[in-house]
Image (cartoon, grey):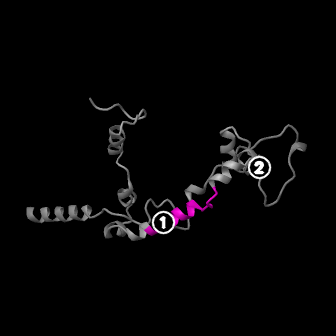
Amino acid sequence: MQAARGALALAGILTLAACGGGDPQLMRVRSDGNGPDAFSVVPSKPLEMPQTLADLPTPTPGGANRTDPNPSADAIVALGGNPNAARSVPAADGAIVAAASRYGREDTRAALATEDLEYRRANPGRFLNRLFNNTTYYQAYEPQSLDQRQELERWRASGRRTPAAPPPAE
């Protein structure tokens, strides 16, 4: 009886040990179902009562209203900017933008997303991770991660200052 329990425990441990590797779906923050998406729910602003009802704007059926959230404009205001300012390059910055884009521009996000998908398809992960829908984000990108301590020691060995890092061990 003890041998059967031991064999069952060993089989369970080996099954769990096989759960490592990469997975193309990684963190799975998108909803695959028909239910509501928790990441798309943004609370509306509180209702406000104007001093007089004549101050109310003209209704725009199907349009935005004053309580609709606008996260981009709210972030601009929080950082001290003007959300109504034009979203173009100021004339004073035209030369630097021209110099930076002299070899052309590319859509970095689209290129990165394409390369990332190709990488994840080439590293699909282990069978049990895919079967049980486990998150394998960190295993998938482990070969591309930076060893922080090794990099810190490399910088220190080259004589560079590392003021943000903890002092070297004595």
Query: Which residue: 56% across, 68% down?
Result: 34
Q: What's under tag 1, amino acid-wise?
A: Glu
Query: Which residue: 21% across, 61% down?
Result: 13
Please state if 33 lies on the left or on the right of 49 as rendered. left
Residue 115: mark in rendering: 1
The quarter of the rendered structure image containing the C terminus is: top left
Q: Which residues are magenta?
A: 101-118
Q: Element under label 1?
A: helix
Sooner in the amino-acid sequence: mark 2 or mark 1: 2
Q: Is residue 125 magenta?
A: no
Looking at this view, name the residue that lies furthest to the top.
170
Query: Which residue: 42% across, 66% down?
Result: 120
In terms of image quadrants, where is residue 38?
bottom right
In terms of depth relative to the viewer, which is nearer, 140 or 136? 140
When the figure is inspected, residue 161 is found, relative to residue 92, above or below; the finding is above
Please state if 104 lies on the left or on the right of 4 as rendered. right
When the figure is inspected, residue 157 is found, relative to residue 97, above or below; the finding is above
